[in-house]
Image (tube, grey):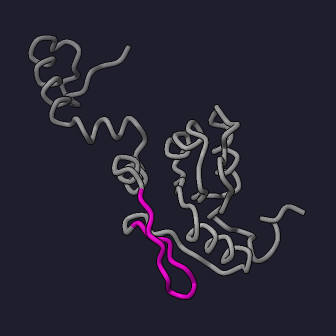
Amino acid sequence: DFVLDNAPWQGAQILIAGANFGCGSSREHAPWALNALDIRCVIAPSFGEIFYGNCFKNGMLPITLDGEPHARLLAEAQAGRAMTVDLPEGEIRLADGAAIPFATPQRQRDALINGWDEIDLIRARHADAIRSFQTHQQSVQPWLWTADKQEPTHG
């Protein structure tokens, strides 16, 4: 029996893992497989670099946490106690009310909170430059733009 198919872990969305989690994965299939299991967050002492980046690209939060905090989370999970991850606050909250802080790079944090992919991040960070380019292009190449949408035509 697969452990996540059994109570109390059935339906769990947080995976507590060991060191170097995802170190053998150089493709997106590893985060895809975890997403298929409804895992939204993986907490480990360390990650394979490519896996770590692919998690964010696939809407999954990897949290690097080691030492006593990781050991405590592992013990809580093994005991079947609930925990929640509060990304905006940067805290993992335990059933007893304790909170364990964690850090996430700001860019990836914003993307996960807002549901943005890499294109959305570019649009958010460079909106003024994009608008400026579009305004200029409309004036020098108006035939590329539809009259009703003010967006470039495709085709």
Q: Residue furthest bottom?
A: 96
Tell me the quarter of the picture where residue 91 sits.
bottom left
Residue 37 at what x, y percent from top left? 70, 56
Residue 111 lies left or right of residue 36; in this view the side is left
Q: Is residue 15 above or below residue 72?
A: above
Residue 91 lies left or right of residue 39; in this view the side is left
Q: Is residue 50 above or below residue 87?
A: above
Residue 151 at what x, y percent from top left? 24, 27
Tell me the quarter of the picture where residue 58 sits.
top right
Residue 83 at what x, y percent from top left? 58, 76
Quadrant placement of the N terminus:
bottom right
Quadrant placement of the C terminus:
top left
Toward the viewer: 137 or 129?
129
User: Would residue 107 be counted in the magenta stretch?
Assistant: no
Q: Residue furthest right?
A: 1
Q: How many marks?
A: 0
Tell me the quarter of the picture where residue 7 sits.
bottom right
Residue drawn at the location 66% of the way across and 40% of the way down: 23
Toward the viewer: 20 or 13?
20
Residue drawn at the location 67% of the way across and 70% of the way down: 74
Residue drawn at the location 73% of the way across and 80% of the way down: 79
Residue 125 lies left or right of residue 50; in this view the side is left
Q: Is residue 106 above or below residue 153?
A: below
Residue 130 at what x, y percent from top left? 20, 29
Residue drawn at the location 70% of the way across and 37% of the way down: 24
Magenta span: 90-103
Toward the viewer: 52 or 39?
52
Q: Is residue 56 above or below residue 126?
A: below
